[in-house]
Image (cartoon, rainbow, N blue to C red):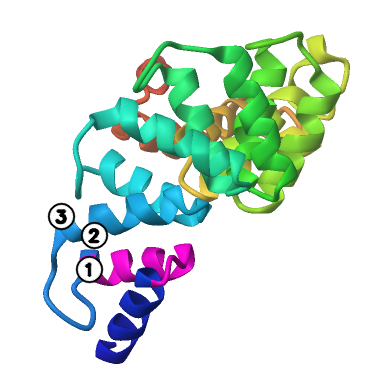
Amino acid sequence: MREARRLSKQACDLASGNGCNLYANLLETGNGGPVDLEAAETQYVRACSLGTSGGCFNLAQAIYEGRIGNGGLARARSLYEQACTGKVAQGCQNLGAMEKSGQGGPVNLVLARNHFDVACRAGRPDGCGALGLMLLTAEGGPADVIGAARVLERSCNANIAAACDNLGFIFGNPAFGMTDMVRARTLFDRACTMGEMHGCYNLAIRLQRGLGGAIEPVRAAVLFARACDAGLAESCQAASHGQ
């Protein structure tokens, strides 16, 4: 690692953005020498200014997580935007999340939806999951249930638990015109198995009522209690009423 640090510094001195990015990472983590967070920030900035989008992203992450730098969430958001423009898919995903929640700047649902779309198309399953929810709920643009189902399935297949739960909601709700109770139950089961408590609650309802399969009151009660213990208020209410 000492040699990597020496060589990356040398490359950075020769205006290699990738060299600066690697050197900054080694300075930040203390690999190959002492930790120097101030120098790490300087080299991430240089990498970013030299057009290495990974440097923009790494600095954004470090600032967002409070490891180095100043400027707070607004600076992180700006750097994620630079990373996204430079085709760093996770930069688009993180930028979309900040735009949706209003971190580091105003809420902008239109831009958030667009950036989740970019992330999804670039292969980020979490981007597909976030995009699917916005398509389903008509946030940042018109509702598109078919489009939502398509990207949520992609996300669910990549083991994003919330996406499985939301896809189950589509198939379990006749209002969307894609009713498949058996599939909905299977999706809620999968979401629950991966730790999504809304999935456990939704599965419990179907077990209790026999939707999409046999009635299983004992298992339903266990799942209501599990989701309640995790803080899901509606599940606590269901458990207390023996729903």
Q: Position of residue 91 (x, y in %)?
A: 51, 42
Which residue range is magenta in the image? 14-27
Amino acid at the residue labelled 1: Leu
Which element is circle 2 on? Answer: helix
Q: Residues within 10 Å of mark 3 (few under 14, many from 20)?
A: few
Read off the residue under disc 1: 27
Q: Is residue 58 left or right of residue 112?
A: left
Q: Position of residue 243 (x, y in %)?
A: 49, 18
Image quadrant where one finds the N terminus: bottom left
Q: Are marks 3 and 2 in contact (CB under 8 Å)?
A: yes
Read off the residue under disc 3: 38
Amino acid at the residue labelled 3: Glu
**In the rendered structure, which disc, 2 or 1, sits on the residue that comes first in sequence?**
1
Residue 16 appearing in the image: yes
Q: Main secondary structure of the magenta part?
A: helix
Amino acid at the residue labelled 2: Ala
**In the rendered structure, which disc, 1 or 3, sits on the residue that comes first in sequence?**
1
